[in-house]
Amino acid sequence: MKSKYTVLDMFSGAGGLSEGFFQQGFEFVSHIEKDKYARNSLETRAIYHALKNSNNEKIYREYILGNFNRDEFIQKFKELELPPIGLLEGEISESNEDSMKKEIQKHIDVLNIDSVDVMIGGPPCQAYSLAGRGRKPEEMKDDPRNYLYKHYTSFLKNFEPKIFVFENVPGIRSAKDGIIYSNLHEEVKRLGYTTEAHILNSKDFSVLQERRRIIFIGWKDEYDLSYPDFPNKPSRRFNISALLNDLPPLQADEGTEGPAKYAKPFVKSSRYLQRFKIRENKDILIQHNARMHNSRDRIIYRLAIEKWDKERKRLKYDELTPELQTHKNKTSFLDRFKVINQYGYSHAVLAHISKDGHHFIHPDIKQARSLTVREVARIQSFPDNYKFEGPRIAQYAQIGNAVPPLMAKGIAIEIEKMLEEIS
């Protein structure tokens, strides 16, 4: 059996899906991501894993502490002469597909690898999501992102991995009247893969969030494999309060991007944080800074929290007094303010959180604010030592677009088992 299986990472984002495979010990031959800030976050994280595996984690810690800037951090990594990260820049297009494939092959040669074992990834989901199609039906119908899956299958054909994982929103099944979903199945079948797609919920992977994703898993026809038997019952042992109670309370516009102290020592943090290694003993708190909110929004937040605490009901927009209402539409989109359910699982974190925090209100009425980047990252199961690059608005978007790492690790575990069967 191989000590490490190899992965090609497509449409990587900030690295949520990648993180699960990193944690399971997979070796990446390359990552492809077009967004500058997401790509920087992924690069930082890939370097972190390389430093950790080579007993040089102290360099990452110094970076987190702010003792040198990102350019210095990358330079210190390069000076170690470790294998390259293999991160490709830019959006995949017909004009650059061939050059990207050649670059990936160069990385494979440098790593002295015979072949790619697994290909993972999923194109941006906005054109497939029901919410996006609901807001802009005509734009989404003609959105060129509908066809990004063709680049995925093109790379699949070129590198011929033993197994692939393609993830997306459940709405891909009905996008363009189901044509994309059926075409994807037909195309991978033509390439010699057996594939199945199932809708999985992140809460079944110990993520404290209701988040449904469709996960396609395919394997070469020659292998006698089957779709993994993933868990389908969430753990009831933990709730959202387990994610929040060791973080320092903040008022609007308080906190810091840089290093800060936890409100509780590691030994007094929740069993959830410790068990799933969201927080570790040596961690430094970063990116726990609250948005600024106007006084009207904070009044609404308190009303929403009070209603949730007393009645377990969401505040509707038409229930607000006239002086608190700013929108003329009082018959639809009434669910504009949503408190995180501290007694159970969070609703799905979406990239929209980058625009405002009204759907992600902290449950503590004394704080009356939206969630910080670190709090949202925890709901998505990102470890506390995961640094998101770029401005805060970009950090929120990266987290909202990501596959929860705990879910990704659960998938990686089963993929590893499948590879062991055919090794």
Image (cartoon, rainbow, N blue to C red):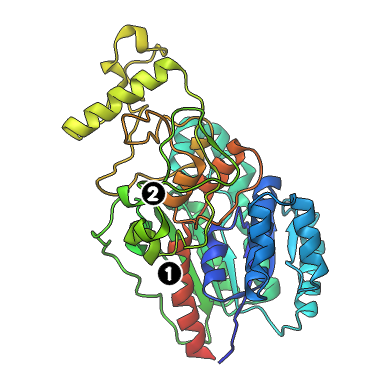
Comparing 417 with 292, the one in front is 292
**Marks 2 & 1, CB-CB < 8 Å contact:** no
Q: Is residue 221 visible?
A: yes
Figure quadrant of the C terminus: bottom right
Picture disc at residue 357: none
Picture disc at residue 246: 2
Q: Residues within 10 Å of mark 2 (few under 14, many from 20)?
A: some
**Image position, residue 371 (x, y; %):** 44, 37
Q: Residues within 10 Å of mark 1 (few under 14, many from 20)?
A: some
Q: Is residue 128 visible?
A: no
Amino acid type for the residue under numbered disc 2 = Asp
Q: Which residue does the numbered mark 1 point to in the structure image? A: 410
Figure quadrant of the N terminus: bottom right
Instruction: For mark 1, give the secondary structure.
Output: helix
At 76% from the left and 74% from the top, the residue drawn is 83
Comparing 81 with 59, the one in front is 59
Q: Is residue 171 left or right of residue 145?
A: left
Q: Is residue 292 above or below residue 264?
A: above
Comparing 152 with 325, the one in front is 325
Instruction: For mark 2, give the secondary structure.
Output: loop
At 58% from the left and 80% from the top, the residue drawn is 162
Foreground mark, 2 or 1? Answer: 2
Q: CA distance from mark 2 to mark 1?
A: 26 Å
Q: Is residue 241 above or below residue 313?
A: below
Amino acid type for the residue under numbered disc 1 = Gly
Q: Is residue 340 left or right of residue 56?
A: left
Q: Is residue 375 left or right of residue 93?
A: left
